[in-house]
Amino acid sequence: MQKNDTNPVSAWDIPLALVLLTRLPLPRLPEKVFARQAQAAWAFPVVGLVIGTLACVIGWLALTLSVPPFVCAVLLVATMTMTTGAMHEDGLADTFDGLWGGFTRERRMEIMKDSHIGTYGVLSLIASQLMRVTAVATLLSAGAFLAIIAACVVSRAFMPLLMAALPNARKSGLSHSVGAPPVGPVAVSLALAGLTGVLLLGGQVILPALCAALVVGALALVAKTKIGGQTGDILGASQQLAEITFLIAMAAQL
């Protein structure tokens, strides 16, 4: 596989996407595979399918042991977080700290790069986790495991879209090193997420997906205005906001 590999899909893309977005113990991939990081973005929804399924297995096991739904929801969300190494939650916190904690583009970028967490970041994590756990608990009480899996899948389809639609705001970092995916992988990602959502939820997927798209669109607009584009933190925040919005919208339909 060469640096100029432009094949839209490769057998290596799914394991590569898992390496990029999770902390699952996977075999070491050949170095040449990492040249496809941008093209492999089509497989991000597949990563969501894996994460959502693993988390739902934990939630289901807890429910069968008569653990209260809210505690099951905490365990399920904790499984999601540990599987990804909390990278998306970290991005959410850094995004809120940076976009609302600085008054100039340079200061916002500096805050987002800082490893310390600020007030906005702490509050965003508290609020997001409360909403996430509460929505998941509601869905678990109704046995709506497929809705949780769909949320994990659909929310990760927006990441390649933002990578392609917005310029990199920083000349370093993971998002910059990966690069912008071509149109093909972005389209495959969206189609894959849409098809999976329909297969899992039927027509019920439409409203939550639209709500998630609106929230991600708003984030993209704010990011473009305040820092001139996207970073890895913005991508992580988009996943979290899309997932939470999807979960809440699904819970509201019960």
Image (tube, rainbow, N blue to C red):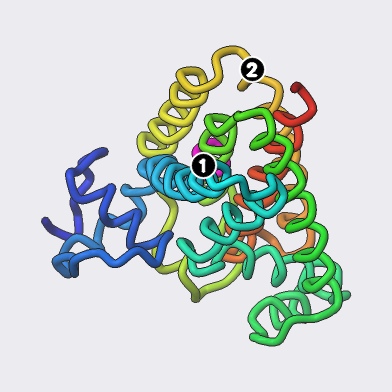
Q: Which segment did they paint magenta?
A: 152-156
Specify which label sits upstream in the sequence, 2 or 1. Answer: 1
Q: Nearer the viewer, residue 22 or 136?
A: 136
Local crowd at mark 1 within 10 Å, few (<14), some, or many (≥20)?
some
- Secondary structure of residue under mark 1: helix
Q: Which residue is mark 1?
A: 60
Q: Nearer the viewer, residue 141 or 13?
A: 141
Local crowd at mark 2 within 10 Å, few (<14), some, or many (≥20)?
some
Q: Say if mark 2 contacts mark 1, CB within 8 Å.
A: no
Q: Amino acid at mark 2?
A: Gln
> Of the residues tagged 2 and 1, which is closer to the observer?
1
Q: Amino acid at mark 1?
A: Trp
Q: Position of residue 18 (x, y in %)?
A: 34, 56
Q: Is residue 81 magenta?
A: no
- Secondary structure of residue under mark 2: helix
Task: Tell me if residue 172 comes above or below residue 204 in the rendering.
Answer: below
- Is residue 114 in view from this perspective? yes
Task: Tell me if residue 31 comes above or below residue 164 in the rendering.
Answer: below
Q: Position of residue 62 (x, y in %)?
A: 54, 49
State whether the magenta stretch is mostly helix, strand or loop. helix
State which quadrant residue 195 falls in.
Answer: top left
- Is residue 160 in view from this perspective? no
State which quadrant residue 154 falls in.
Answer: top right
